Amino acid sequence: MKTPKPGDNAKNEQLSGHTTEGEDKFLNTNQGTRVNDDQNTLKAGDRGPSLLEDFIMREKITHFDHERIPERVVHARGSAAHGVFKVYDNRLSAYTRAAFLTDPAAETPVFVRFSTVAGSRGSTDLARDVRGFAVKFYTQEGNFDLVGNNMPVFFIQDAIKFPDLVHAVKPEPHNEMPQAASAHDTFWDFISLMPESAHMIMWLMSDRAIPRSYRMMEGFGVHTFRLVNEEGKSTFVKFHWKPLLGVHSVAWDEAQKISGKDPDFHRRDLWEAIENGFYPEYELGVQLVAEEDEHKFPFDLLDPTKIIPEEMVPVQRVGKLTLNRNPDNFFAETEQVAFHVGHVVPGIDLTNDPLLQGRLFSYTDTQLIRLGGPNFHEIPINRPLPEVTNNQRDGFMRQQINRGRTSYHPNSLGGGCPFQAKWAEGGFRSHNEKIDAHKVRARSKSFFDHFSQATLFYNSQSPAEKVHLANALAFELGKVETVAVRERMVGILTQIDVGLATTVADALGLGVPEAPEQPVNHSIPADGDPQDFQPVTVKLDLAASAALSMANTLKNSVKSRKVAILTADGVHTASVEAMQAALEAEGAVGEVVAPRLGFVEGNDGKDIPVKNSYLTAASVLYDAVYLPGGTGALVLNGDAVHFLNEAFRHCKPIAYDTTAVDVIGATYFGTGDHPGCYSGDELRLLAGAFIEGMKQHRFWERETPGPIPA
């Protein structure tokens, strides 16, 4: 046997395909070139556009894009629907030439895909996660894709860090655990070293990460885009989607139970709502900033970890999106739809946001392998309305049959066709932005405020939301086994709110550090001075923003809410039917739950159809609970009593007939005066109060004394 020589280990590793952790090694490319700066994309100036020649970023993201086949690398689990968009009026014509945003007579077809981010296709809908909110507008001028999330900011400022982020949050590579969860060491190790993630972490740990429904969550374009009018004048824009049902969440304990009872909860909710005619509706909102006002804010408009608070720039609601048709085939439509932030139309343009710039490369790159080649635009769900006439030919899965002998431009043999289109003829023209800068890998100093908006978000939450956020941090960090990572993260939290840091530290059995670990920011290039990359403190002239709290959302409808009507043989038929009628009149649905499927016999001998049994249903699948009269037998039914206890624990509205007090008395909460609990023997009055309570969604103040057993 040959005796290994010094230096042979590296070659042996190379030949075996193994690498060794823990040794001092340099970052390098797949060709072995050492990397000096893995934190910043190569740009024309520190606020300029990213450059195509950045082979480090391209190699890194290309490899990342192709790591998972055939499902999406991220946003693998999704559901979708068809619909239409109509703008209300032509007010945006002063800002953009995009016809679908300026012509109130036009009805634009859309396809919308909602998704989770971290989990695989088989994961649960109810993971604590960001939700994708991607809209494909099939306009007469071509496809425009507004590819956003249900949170307006992101974890990172530069796209070159996206593979690192996703590698950190995905299941750990040595054991492929945990699935669809950020509560593990590698994610929080990364986050605690990257203070630019602080703002996004506040959103992710808030109730926004566990929405009640896709129909009840906001959407955001995340990036700052441009609108360009007929004269070529540019205006910065942030896009918002505002659900007309309000923004609502579920409790974390409830989310975990839903994952067991129905991991397809959000998919099913969207599908059933559309099938039943409860069409989800969202208003498109825009925040407009004149180009000359770009630098008037205490934050950078190009920083994807920042919002423009609505108190600074109001959101103008300019149109409505209605989802009115489910897909005919999940794979052909929902799975094969291909979104791209670079799918824009004349009148909408991009900015130099360094995260947006990287996404321009990444989206096409991923579709090439996921959908089999460069012709993914020919799949029916991806086809634009206008005829595609260009000189691109051949490739895998080509569908279009082109006539003629020319596939180049300019040409004379084909009469010069297809022609280039002037701006006046509807041709896309990039905004004429002046760039005069050195070619650098750098981050603008205006991106170094990492904590002020995280603090603004936390200060804007209601008392209940603050408790939920602290509990989420304690839960997630409690799953982290490396104590040093927990301690470092608590140090980061002290820069957001000391009270929050203290609460989380106490739950983790840690002390609160006087200052965070130094340097706070570990995302620096090899030749960088850590002091040059330390976070800076920016004072916002805004203590809180009402739009950031779900407590201030719309609470004026019970449309499509599902109510469990608990029954047993002998139930008062009139009570069941009257409540169902009252709920139906308001657009809600009352479903009968009983000890068995089939029918229960009412007190008048009438058979009442049963939707679910106590075995097949659970309170977590409903928005509220009604206990009619004649259900005294349920006092001995542990499943029914548990159903009520669980609904109370999750702060849902509960109504009961006064003749059912024995059943309520068997619960942990009893017949006392509780917020959101209604009783009475006059059904009309009881139903009225109950429905008004349902509009509030939840009564979180019930949590103050502590959760009851359920």
Image (cartoon, grey):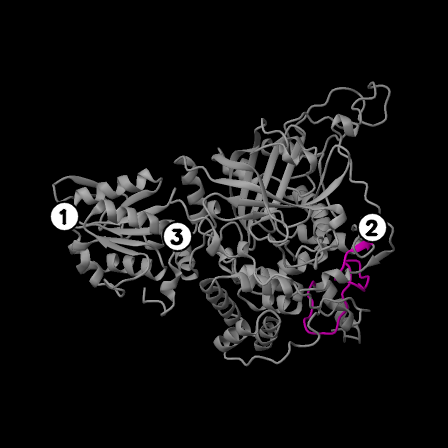
Please state if 411 lies on the left or on the right of 628 as rendered.
Answer: right
Prevailing SS of the magenta stretch: loop
Q: Quadrant of the C terminus?
A: bottom left
Q: Give the residue drawn at x 21%, y 63%.
A: 666
Residues under labels 3 and 2: Cα distance?
A: 52 Å
Q: Can residue 622 be seen in the rendering of this structure?
A: no
Q: Earlier in the sequence, mark 2 or mark 1?
A: 2
Q: Residues within 10 Å of mark 2 (few under 14, many from 20)?
A: few
Residue closer to the observer: 88 or 421:
88
Q: Earlier in the sequence, mark 3 or mark 2?
A: 2
Point out residue 455 in the picture as x, y percentages from the top left corner.
59, 65
Identify the residue position indicated by label 2 in the image. 53
Identify the residue position indicated by label 1 in the image. 570
Identify the residue position indicated by label 3 in the image. 697
- Residue 29: say if magenta: yes
**Which residue range is magenta in the image?**
17-44
Q: Are marks 3 and 2 in contact (CB under 8 Å)?
A: no
SS under mark 3 = loop
